[in-house]
Image (tube, rainbow, N blue to C red):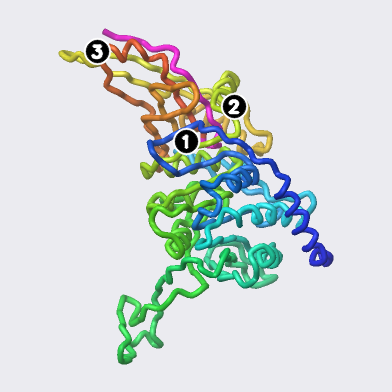
Amino acid sequence: MSSLLKDIAKVIERAKTQAANVKPQEFTLTEEIGQHTQNRLFCGDNIHLIKAMTMDPKWKGKIQLIYLDPPFFSKTDYDAVLSTEGDKVKHLAYNDRWKHGMYEYLRQLTARLILMKDLLSDEGLLFLHLDWHAVHYAKVVMDEIFGEQNFVNEIIWTYKSGGSTKRRFSRKHDNILVYSKTSKYMFHALKEKSYNRGFKPYHFKGVQEYRDEVGWYTMVNMKDVWNIDMVGRTSAERTGYATQKPEALLERIIDCCTNENDICADFFCGSGTLPAVAVRKGRRFVACDNGSLAVENTIGRIAAQRGRLKVYSQKPLEDALVKSLRPRFEASLHAEVRDIVSSPQKILQISLESVKERRLEQEMNEKSAAQIRKIEKEKPLDLVQAWSIDYNFDGKVFRPKEIYLRRNGKLQTTSEKMIDALEAQHLDHIVIKIVDIMGNVSFQRLDEITFFD
């Protein structure tokens, strides 16, 4: 590793070549939740998306905040802990292993950072979230890309969680490097409590003091060490996704450098914390991840807030529907139409009855695979994370009118919709999307409907 410092210049040059030569990828709109939204979620390799965005004047120089939570070069695999009503199943979320070591890791990260600089607005900030594994090298790279004069902060996020050892002090913090593109970046100084010595009042002239259950304090500009708890096991925001970051952390980042309607981007969006907070804060977002579990988690979090977004994929939805003929899993659905007494209207009822996992991922360990098979046999619907219904699928974009998400282990499995006699004759465009707890997706057309007079 001692030679890596000599290779930093080579890493940057190779990354510049990679960034210049990477081909932009066209993404196709496949799903739309709500209308008239500029929120976008992309499923695919982020470097192809970023390159395409740098060539589009709609995006170039328009993003106010870029937050990056990439792999940390931990050289390990990360599991998502997937919860059903009574079981917890581990499933690979992503791996952080690099065949050619730190050199490869830095080159891939640097190429993306070079491209992202073109997306950042002159008033914007980029936050790179890492830890002790690679942050020291990343700091040198960021100085080269953005200029050392545009270094703004190194935020230390400290927390209680994590392992301890008798071989060293416990590693209980992450590092977040903050860089601007110009000297005119926007920054809102946030305030925090600063307790008086002895928690007693100072009575200084012109100093406003406050008191809470701990004692007396003043409000001061926030420091660069942030003590924010990780997402706890029983937290309402917990998705089970590996390395999920707390919403309180992203709230602070969004608050300090954006205004309402500004665009925030996260190109390693994982569990979807930045998109979820951006929606709640009235910001627009662009997010990307290469994993289906991450994308579906993000969709679920936005839908739970009744937020709006468009989902794009590197493959059109027609391909997904064709693949549904041989899906990883398949759901059994029942649909019926019933008359309503003394009314011209009818009730369309769609029920999710069971699920069969046809193929499990090769990366899943034997214990988890056995758990899945046991759940499939005893409580198959526990394998469903979400399902949604498009009553008038156009063959290209899935636009659900009903979305059912698992909440606190519970999932509504029956949907009812009032329809008139004419609608009852045209139900051949109904498509159901089912997502299992591992992020696998199956689209199924509603082919058989039972009619009751």
Observer-nearest of 406 and 55: 55
Q: Which residues are magenta?
A: 437-453
Q: Tag 2's secondary structure?
A: loop
Dot 2: within a 10 Å radius of its alpha carbon, few (fewer than 14), some, or many (20 or more) residues?
A: some
Q: Position of residue 397 (x, y in %)?
A: 47, 28
Residue extending furthest toward the front: 57
Work out whether 308 lies above or below 1: above
Q: Position of residue 46 (x, y in %)?
A: 62, 45
| Residue 292 seen in the current view | yes
Q: Is residue 202 left or right of residue 275?
A: left
271 on left or right of 413: right
* Residue 207 locus on image (x, y percent): 32, 86
| Element type at mark 3 | strand
Q: Quadrant of residue 138?
A: bottom right
Residue 443 magenta-drawn? yes
Q: Residue furthest top?
A: 453
Where is the N terminus found, in terms of image quarters? bottom right
Q: CA distance from mark 3 to mark 2?
A: 36 Å
Amino acid type of the residue that numbered disc 1 sits on in the rendered structure? Gln
User: Residue 339: which numbered mark, if any?
Assistant: 3
Which numbered disc, 1 or 2, marks the residue that appears first in the sequence? 2
Distance in Å between CA atoms under marks 1 and 2: 15 Å
Crowding at dot 1, Cα within 10 Å, few <14 / some 14-19 / many 20+, comes out as many
Which of marks 1 and 3 precedes in the sequence?
3
Residue bearing mark 1: 385
Residue kind at label 3, given as amino acid type: Asp
Q: Quadrant of residue 294?
A: top right
The residue identified by callout 2 is 328
